[in-house]
């Protein structure tokens, strides 16, 4: 049972992101209502891709680094600035927490078994 719980809680690697240089081609002013997103263009897999940047206020023509997911790259997608995603250390911490939870569960079960096992009936 504890092995099943640990398997359910074990985080997967998820999507891997690749840092790619991009050029801001359209600027959106920050502070308006709704999501303000600049438009960038970058090269990926030998083709030029136009995407929305999850950010605003970039100078048109400026070079920035963005994070592109390993799959599903297409025009109109939303990308983020490089370094703003989830760090790999967060995945390691989640895995450690999952292992420690399983160990704590096993220790609790052992404690209950020992306490109940030493009681004499009646």
Image (cartoon, grey):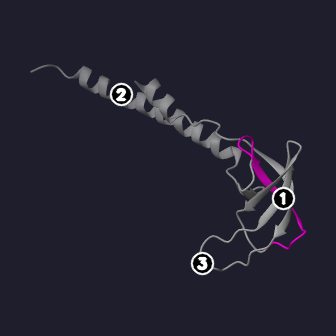
> Rounded to the nearest whole Å, what is the CA distance between mark 3 and mark 2?
53 Å
Q: Is residue 67 above or below residue 32?
A: above
Residue indicated by mark 2 = 109
Q: Secondary structure at mark 3?
A: loop
Please tell me whether mark 3 or mark 2 is closer to you in this view: 3
- Residue that label 3 marks: 33
Q: Which mark is residue 20?
A: none
Q: Kindly check if marks 1 and 3 are in contact, taking CB atoms under 8 A apart as contact.
A: no
Residue named by callout 1: 41
Q: Quote the CA–CA distance across marks 1 and 2.
A: 56 Å
In front of the other: 66 or 13: 66
Identify the residue at image location x=68%, y=45%.
Answer: 89
Front residue of 61 and 16: 61
Closer to the chain start, of discs 1 and 2, is 1
Q: Quick one: 114 or 93, which is closer to the camera?
A: 93
Quarter holding the C terminus is top left
Which x, y percent locates residue 110?
37, 25
Question: What residue range appears in magenta?
Answer: 58-73
Q: Nearer the viewer, residue 34 or 97?
A: 34
How far is mark 1 from mark 3, CA to CA?
Answer: 24 Å
Left or right of 93, for residue 77: right
Asked which quadrant contains residue 59, the reply is bottom right
């Amino acid at each position: 049972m504890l092995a099943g719980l640990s398997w359910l809680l074990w985080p997967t690697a998820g999507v891997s992101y690749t840092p790619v240089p991009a050029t801001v081609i359209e600027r959106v002013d920050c502070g308006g209502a709704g999501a303000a997103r600049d438009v960038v263009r970058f090269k990926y897999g030998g083709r030029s891709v136009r995407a929305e940047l999850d950010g605003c206020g970039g100078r048109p023509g400026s070079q920035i680094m963005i994070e592109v997911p390993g799959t599903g790259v297409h025009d109109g997608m939303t990308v983020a600035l490089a370094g703003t995603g989830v760090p790999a250390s967060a995945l390691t911490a989640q895995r450690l927490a999952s292992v420690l939870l399983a160990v704590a569960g096993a220790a609790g079960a052992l404690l209950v078994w020992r306490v109940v096992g030493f009681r004499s009936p009646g």
